[in-house]
């Protein structure tokens, strides 16, 4: 999902989040990790982590659209 955003945006910034809550559930990371970090950003706080280099995770062989991603996931032999 973020790959598509980075491909299509003029400018992006990303961070490695190094903040961890006191309790991090194995199955509820959205509640325990992502929601608190989103709240920090919504308050205008800086992201709790280190900036990443642009394109650090970009791969030239990743498709640029959701239809192609779905096709490759459902039919990997054809991809």
Image (cartoon, rainbow, N blue to C red):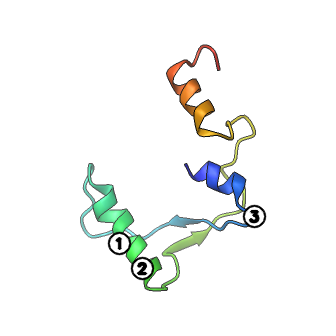
Which residue: 54% across, 18% down? 75
Q: Is residue 60 left or right of residue 21?
A: right
Label 3 belongs to which residue? 10
Label 2 belongs to which residue? 40
3 or 1: mark nearer the eye: 3
Q: Outermost residue, bottom direction?
A: 44
Q: Earlier in the sequence, mark 2 or mark 3?
A: 3
Q: Dots 1 and 2: beta carbons under 8 Å?
A: yes
Label 1 belongs to which residue? 36
Which secondary structure lies at badge 3?
Answer: loop
Q: Dots 2 and 3: beta carbons under 8 Å?
A: no
Which secondary structure lies at badge 2?
Answer: helix
Which residue: 58% across, 25% down? 72
Residue 3 is situated, as x and y percent measured from the top left of the image, at 63, 49
Which secondary structure lies at badge 1?
Answer: helix
Q: How far apart are marks 1 and 2 (CA)?
A: 6 Å
Figure quadrant of residue 30: bottom left
Q: Outermost residue, front direction?
A: 67
Q: Is residue 78 above or below residue 20?
A: above
Q: How far apart are marks 2 and 3 (CA)?
A: 24 Å
Tell me the quadrant of the picture where the C terminus can be found: top right
Q: In this view, does 37 lie to the left or right of 10?
A: left
């Amino acid at each position: 999902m973020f790959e598509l955003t980075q491909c299509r945006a003029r400018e992006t910034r990303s961070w490695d989040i190094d903040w961890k809550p006191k309790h991090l559930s194995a199955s509820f990371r959205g509640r325990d990790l992502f929601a608190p970090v989103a709240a920090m950003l919504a308050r205008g706080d800086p992201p709790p982590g280190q900036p990443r280099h642009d394109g650090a995770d970009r791969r030239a062989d990743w498709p640029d659209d959701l239809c192609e991603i779905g096709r490759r996931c459902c039919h990997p032999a054809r991809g």
